[in-house]
Image (cartoon, helix red, strand yellow):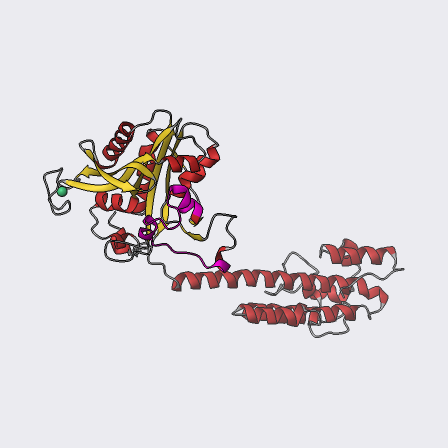
Amino acid sequence: MSYRPARGQSEAERGEGLVGRTCGRPSDRFVHGLPTRHKRVEKRAPEPNDRSADEEDGPAAVTPGEPGGELGPPWDDLLAAALAAVREAADPGTLEAARVRFLGRNGEIPAALRAVGRLPAERRPAAGAAGNRVRTAVAAALTERAATLSRGELDARLATEVVDVTLPGRTPRQGHPHPLATTRAELERIFATLGFAVAEGPEVESEWYNFEALNMPSGHPARDSHDSFYLEDALAGEPAQGEGRLLLRTHTSPVQIRHMLARGGALPVRVVCPGRVYRRDDDATHSPMFHQLEGILVDRGISMAHLKGVLAEAARGLFGAKTRVRMRPSYFPFTEPSAEVDVSCVFCGGTGCATCKGSGWIEILGAGMVHPAVLTAGGYNPEEVSGFAFGIGIDRCAMLRFGIDQMRLLFEGDLRFLEQF
Ligand SMILES: [Zn+2]
């Protein structure tokens, strides 16, 4: 507990006590009230530990080693010892020990201040003021020494922790889109310029959307070519009534059915449907997962001529202005008539090379006029409207664009391969 003037003191005593406690500078009355003996002592030369030479009656005015002197405890000795301990503290730990020793709750200076309370009432104000000045001086010295020590620590760290500014920086790895992603985006962009919107649908489909609605009823031989991944019932949950089992879609054509049904008979139907599809093929030229972009256009009076015009425009957009397109008769269950569509070889320009096996043509997609049964399943009357549909392998397009000879390379995620594109 620090020194406090007791209640009931005289006005003079209380005033002097407050002065000593609050500003550390005694009033004139205090100076004049000093006994002669002390006046003599204060004339001596100021010692280094004195707070300042101009404080005529600072703590140094006490005769050292006089516990019961007019100013109470031996403040001079305490101040000298505390300042020496602070000065000699070479590290923060030692400095903290000095603080605890002199200013801690049970430290020497608080103990001496408590002793002031036991002095005769007329001596308490002067003794308390002297003690408070000692305490303030020691606290200031502690603060200054702490700042000096931390400056020293910083200097030492700056001297030892050298940063080598000549070391090369760490370059962040720059990513870029996968060749499949850029090819899909390019296809979407080309068909967007022809008025097609982009539609997406679920990769887990029911047999109805994946087969029946596309004119492949149960038992249809074309289903055999779509070796499918069926889902375990527990995984799949219950498909809607009459939709059969659930499977990973084998093509993106179910999205065309979903889109037609969503349009509710409105014309035109004009979308492309990109996405992943799954079949149980796994060899050098096939992957169990690959990418398709299928398209459909349904309106009044649509013919094969429209189909060829759209595909020729798309091929020129993808492979260059000189690309030519040809159609060969083919068969698909969901189109009638159907065609395989070839583009002039992008490598040799049509003169024949190893990639096109000397033919000058490369097969890139299948297409045809939408089968009446498919229009009906989509909610349209085949007597009133007609349409065409096509399906492009995005992976095959990417291989042709970038000269990649193995489809697997697109799916293996090998950065040494992918960083070339
Ligand atoms: Zn060729």
- Which residue shows up at 74% across the image and 55% down it? 22
Whether residue 216 appears in magenta in the rendering, the answer is: yes
Q: In this orientation, does residue 406 appear?
A: yes
Q: Which residue lies furthest to the front in this view?
A: 219
Residue extending farthest to the top is 301
> Is residue 363 or residue 400 the one in the foreground?
363
Q: Residue 363, relative to residue 153: is it above or below?
A: above
Q: Residue 403's spot in the image, x, y percent?
A: 20, 46
Nearer-the-camera pick, 43 or 147: 147
The residue lying toward the viewer, choosing from 117 and 147, is 147
| In this rendering, position of residue 11 left or right of residue 201 | right
| Residue 208 on image: x %, y % | 44, 46
x and y percentages locating residue 23 in the rendered image: 72, 54
Which corner quadrant holds the N terminus?
bottom right
96 or 244, which is in the foreground?
244
Q: Tell me if residue 184 comes above or below residue 35 in the rendering.
A: above
Q: Give the range drawn in magenta.
A: 208-234
Residue 207 on the magenta segment: no
Above or below — where is 421 with respect to 272? below
Instruction: Name above or below for residue 51 compared with residue 394.
Output: below
Identify which residue is drawn at 36% across, 46% down: 251
